[in-house]
Amino acid sequence: MPFTETQSLSPNHDAAPPNERRGVVFHHTAIPFADTVALMLRPESRVSYHCVIDRDGSRCRLVPDHCVAWHAGASEFMGRAGCNAFMLGVAFAGDTYREPLTSLQLASAIEWLAPRWEPLGWTAERMTDHRQVAPGRKADLNPAEWLRLREAIRARFG
Ligand SMILES: [Zn+2]
């Protein structure tokens, strides 16, 4: 550490109103890192994450935190519908049903969270995944991998 972080700004976001940044919805991409970045740079895909984390822990930032990325779709968290408006989206490259998150991906996610955690008033309860905010519609992350991630977050931030 620290992991490499590059930036490739995706056109797929709303600049206003600003993202409320109440917490994070984690995803997996199901496709390789480079393909994910390429997809999100295409306006017609109409999808984006704030950040995608490769298998080796390197990250690409695609949408600025204060903007609304298009990652969650129809979703609900903390009693509110439409997670894109108030949650950041972070994705792990790969398919968590085919292969577990790498330790480098977990460490990189923690590194990404660290500078945001206190300033944004985040707690472990503000962390979730796509499966939990869109139950029955989305399956990422694999529940076992979500537990690993949640464990790593709690170990670092309490
Ligand atoms: Zn997802």
Image (spheres, helix red, strand yellow):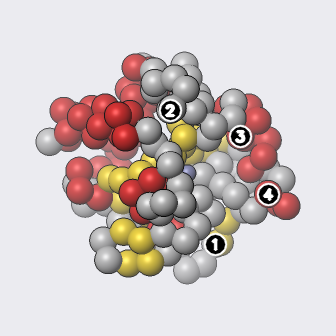
Residue 25 appears in view: no
Q: CA distance from mark 4 to mark 3?
A: 11 Å
Q: Nearer the viewer, mark 3 or mark 1?
A: 3
| Contact between labelled residues 3 and 4, with CB atoms less than 8 Å apart | no
Residue at the image position 59 percent from the left and 31 percent from the top: 94
Q: CA distance from mark 1 to mark 2?
A: 31 Å
Whether residue 4 sits left or right of residue 112 in the image: it is: right
Q: Amino acid at mark 4?
A: Ser
Determine whether the residue tagged by mark 2 lies in a helix, strand or loop.
loop
Q: Earlier in the sequence, mark 4 or mark 3?
A: 3
Q: Amino acid at mark 2?
A: Thr
Determine whether the residue tagged by mark 1 lies in a helix, strand or loop.
loop
Q: Quadrant of residue 123?
A: bottom left
Q: Nearer the viewer, mark 4 or mark 1?
A: 4
Q: Earlier in the sequence, mark 1 or mark 2?
A: 1
Residue at the image position 61 percent from the left and 40 percent from the top: 29
